[in-house]
Amino acid sequence: MTKKGSFFNQFLQYLKNHPAASIAWVWAVSIPFLGSLFLAGNYESILEKEPDSLFDFTLLALLASAIMGLAILPTTLTALFTGFWLGWNGFLWLVAAYSLANVLGYGVGKYLNLDFLNFLSKKSPTFYQELEQKKSNWGALIFFIRISPVIPFAISNLLFASLQVPLRKVLLYGIPGMLPRTIMAFLAGIVASDFMEAKNNLQEPWQITLLILLLIISIWGIWINWKKSKS
């Protein structure tokens, strides 16, 4: 049995013994998809309630942070809808909501996976030691994980929390990593005349090219920094 296969089996055993953690991982994978379907069918009623005061925007940012932090909607779709609904008036509030969503998602993930590292040190000591060697390189790894268009925000939150990556580093390096695809989705929402058109705008050739470029950069960055911390 390979080390990779062994670790995967150990992780499945961990989830089997921790039902709350199992639910969290399944939730992070499935609920954002269901939330997307709900938004697509009900966005018109939301558009009727445009915020017009500081209190409204603050309340909206807190609500958005809870929605993203609890993995009810994908962050890219949230950025798209915010751009379509509020335009540039919503951008700084979106970034603030992202920051709070990081804290919330990390906090929930850490609570549900509190003893994961202890489990890892006993069941896969070799892999645990490899992770320990990478502590000095967490910043770069966080950035390249966040910049990836294929690693969901909720999944990376659970991952960082389970491995007890310092929250300060998750915020410091993770938020800049999220900005490229966030801005791309936000701009797609701004230029669209209809929300469903905005979703289709994400399939424009230049955006597909950008996503592929971000994916290549992410894979390269993760690989380089993983290898660097082993040398």
Image: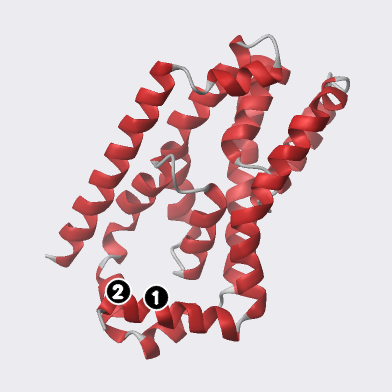
Q: Nearer the viewer, residue 160 or 218?
A: 218
Q: Position of residue 118 (x, y in %)?
A: 45, 85
Whether residue 86 is situated above or below residue 78 in the rendered picture: above
Q: Amino acid at mark 2?
A: Lys
Whether residue 167 is situated above or below residue 48 in the rendered picture: below
Q: Position of residue 177 (x, y in %)?
A: 41, 39
Q: Residue sitting at 44 percent across and 69 percent down?
A: 163
Q: CA distance from mark 2 to mark 1?
A: 6 Å
Q: Residue sitting at 27 percent across and 65 percent down?
A: 134
Q: Position of residue 110 (x, y in %)?
A: 57, 69
Name the residue tied to disc 1: 8
Q: Residue sitting at 55 percent across and 78 percent down?
A: 15
Cβ atoms under marks 2 and 1 closer than 8 Å: yes
Q: Residues within 10 Å of mark 1 (few under 14, many from 20)?
A: few
Q: Nearer the viewer, residue 182 or 44?
A: 44
Asked where in the image residue 106 lies, by quadrant, the reply is bottom right
Q: What is the secondary structure assignment of the residue under circle 2?
A: helix
Left or right for 59, reference 116: right
Q: Quick one: which residue is furthest to the bottom in this view? A: 122
Q: Quick one: which residue is furthest to the front in this view? A: 1
Disc assigned to residue 24: none
Name the residue tied to disc 2: 4
